[in-house]
Amino acid sequence: MKQDERYIWLDLVRGLSAILVCAGHLRAVALVDYAELTAPTLFQKLLYGLTGLGHEAVMVFFVLSGMFVGGSVLKAGDRFSWAAYGTTRLTRLWGVLLPALVLTYLIDSYTLSAHPEVAQGEYAPLWTSGPRTDGSYSTSLVTFLGNLGFVQTIGVPTFGTNSPLWSLANEFWYYVLFPLGTLLLGISGKPAGLGRRLLAGGAIAALAYGLPRGIWLGYLIWLLGVLVYRIQPRFSTRRRWIALLVTLGLFGASLGYSKSLRLQEGLGVSSDLVVGLAFATLCLVLAKWPRPRIPILGPALEKIAIAAADLSYSLYTIHFPVVLLIATHFYLPQKCFPDLPAVLQYLGFLSLLLGIGAAFWYLCERHTPRIRRALIGKRLSVSGRAVGPTS
């Protein structure tokens, strides 16, 4: 997508969300849990608050993905092509996922050569993430192929230590479900006869039976992004500062709700759905927000936003095996108290992870458009842009 066609503020949110996921996983293995701090300073409260939003950031990804990927299906209308759409989505996914799985295997082999107990989940209580004690760790060929086929968490575990790959299965099946639904309703693609609509309905019914409940909850959040796409062109930009403050407040309140087990138990409403709905309202405002026009600072911010967004998928897909490699070599047998030296070390490792993500993007993801053009050329009829962990 050309730079002048991009939603710069949503790009910035997308990039920051990927960094928050990465930062949260690293903090969980490097610094002691917040409950162990007897008198946390304001800085420590901010540090732990920001790095505790990784899961919520994935819900943000889902909304953005629904807006752009689902929106591209609606935009194509009767020009929608399953061949072009499928090639676009799979080249985007596999172009990063395949080398990420190979690199995960190599990193895990090195990590486990020194600390085989990681695979048995010995440190799962310490890290609150990583391989569990249920024996689900696997780098078998079946698991490798299952992750390539996006049935992790459905038929096979996530590959090796790369547990964040769970969300890629969600995204893939949303990419399948939505066009099937639009075909059934006659919204996209050439007018379909009764037979094709019945086939689409049967496929949706089969997926309804086979996909876990958690994937369907995430699909509701993804569909909120599609709703944003439909509403956004007609959304008024008048009094935009008031709209921004109100929607930021709602989003902040939703994040607070996601951290309050008492409220969730009392209301019985999924925190994921609340966060997704609140961000969808904020997304409406940010999609209409003017580009930064401050001399020097404005163009610099745009470049940063685009760069962060572009490497978000690569960073998301490869960071976690590296996090556990860092954990086993620097933070065993215990994590650090978040004093100044420990925080500086943490920030150094976070910078290293961002650099690895950028290098992985340069070696792998940046070639995706070239691969796609080689497969379908200029016949592509559906936008290749995806926003979320899978872009």
Image: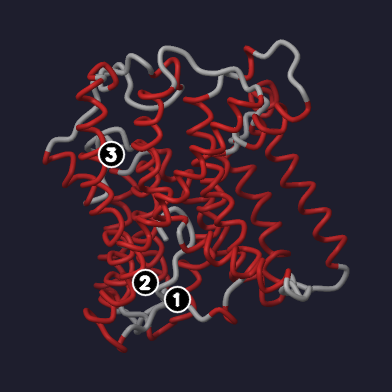
Image position of 138 with respect to 319: above or below: above
Residue to which mark 2 is pinned: 183
Of the pair 141 and 186, the residue shown nearer to us: 141
Quadrant in which the C terminus appears: bottom left
Q: In whole angstroms, how far apart are the C-alphas of marks 2 and 1? A: 6 Å
- Measured along the vertical axis of the image, is residue 315 above or below residue 163? below
Where is residue 220 shown, x and y percent of the image?
Answer: 51, 50
Q: In screen coordinates, is 144 left or right of 89?
A: left
How far is disc 3 from disc 1 in space, using C-alphas?
29 Å
Is 123 on the left-hand or right-hand side of 137? right
Q: Within 10 Å of the Cα at label 1, are there few (<14), some (14-19), or many (20+) other Cα atoms? A: some
Which kind of residue does numbered mark 3 sit on? Answer: Ile
The residue wearing badge 3 is 154
Give the quadrant of residue 10: bottom right
Dot placed on the residue nearer the N-terminal end, 3 or 1: 3
Residue at 24% in and 21% down: 114
